[in-house]
Amino acid sequence: MTFNLPSELSARTGFALSPLDRMSEIREDAPVLAAMRSAAETRFVVIGRDRPILKRLDGGYDPFFTAAEAQTVGRARETVLLGKRDEGAIYAILLEDNAVDIIEVADEGGLIDTRTFVVPGRNDLFVHDLRAMATEGLVPADVIGILGQAKSVMHWHRRHSFCANCGASTEMAAAGWRRECRSCKVQHFPRTDPVVIMLGISGDDCLLGRSGRFGKTMFSALAGFLEPGETIEDAVRREIKEESGINIGRVGYVASQPWPFPASLMIGCVAEALNRDIVMDKVELEDCRWFSRNDVELMLKREHPGGYTAPHPLAIAHHLLRAWRDGETPTF
């Protein structure tokens, strides 16, 4: 197996680029943390109901609030140190849910609810879904990485107020990177859920599938959660076998991507297909088929004669396809 992996491939994926030094070594140093939090150059990103809140500016948006600005948005439930960039420290604030209102509007058929999130009385603020914010390019890529980090850790805090061991309430520690139970003394840490996402490879063809969650034209790499006691390689083999019936031999790592929906790590791989007869899992997939390099080229350009498309560049699946097309993935 040979490799031709550009070191920056992971950084091409959405949410992976961040300028922050996470400063894990000072998370227990209360005096340093207090001085950093009160420094004039420190900025805060604000999360309400799992969504970043942005300041509206002429011609754009700003996710960074001063301490005084952040206090006007709503009551803080938790505050977490994300890290430090050249300009100063960056913290994340989790608002109480009642700081953000949800406006639900049903369509005429009553089948689809379109939810809008607002901070009451604040037309100068914009509450937006993080994925849409990234695809729409509302803030730079390195800022999206910071917001992804904030969303994931705050999602964990929002849902882990009580100890999973004894049921007592927990409190934040280590600048937001641990919760502790005073009752049974158990420590709890933010979780990251590993997901394997992979291209099965047979000669100059790759295996792609379409889930019911996708648009009718989009095909993507197969994917699934890595289970306890399982290697990355075995998870790749199991998921491809379960979803497509294809047996897998060798597996090669390509790149990874933090995916804050809510807190996954996508582990991108390619896998050696040992057969080509597809037996599709019709519960997981609506379609599954082999595509040639030329097919993939046209799908990436959105010029495929069948109308088939590739995932958005935000997703690691897009970059897996592009890297395979360009010969930047392991070969078998």
Image (cartoon, rainbow, N blue to C red):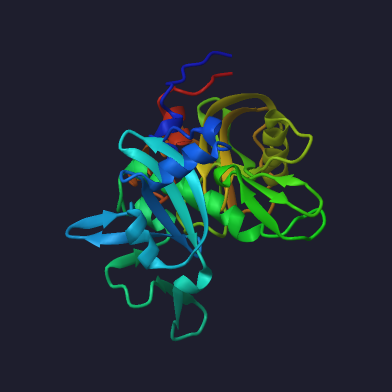
Which residue is nearer to you in this view: 158 or 130?
158
Residue 145 located left or right of residue 275: left
Q: Is residue 239 above or below residue 104?
A: above
Q: Nearer the viewer, residue 158 or 258?
A: 158
Residue 228, by quadrant, is top right
Q: Is residue 159 left or right of residue 113?
A: right
Tell me what residue is drawn at x 57 percent, y 59 percent.
212
Residue drawn at x 46%, y 47% is 148
Q: Residue at x 39, y 40 (%)?
A: 89
Q: Residue furthest top?
A: 2
Quadrant in the picture for the C terminus: top right
Residue lying furthest front: 31
Q: Is residue 262 above or below residue 204?
A: below
Q: Position of residue 252 (x, y in %)?
A: 59, 24
Q: Position of residue 24 (x, y in %)?
A: 54, 33
Instruction: Compare residues 218 and 154 and report the one nearer the observer.
Output: 154
- Please state the total of marks drawn on the protein image: 0
The quadrant in which the N terminus is found is: top right
Q: Position of residue 52 (x, y in %)?
A: 41, 58
From this view, report whether residue 178 is shown above or below residue 327.
below
Along the line of sight, the residue nearer the viewer: 330 or 139: 139
Give the percent coordinates (x, y) of residue 300: 37, 41
Q: Confirm whether residue 286 shows in the render.
A: no
- On the question of residue 81 being in view, the answer is yes
Question: Dividing the picture into quarters, in which one does residue 284 lie?
Answer: bottom right
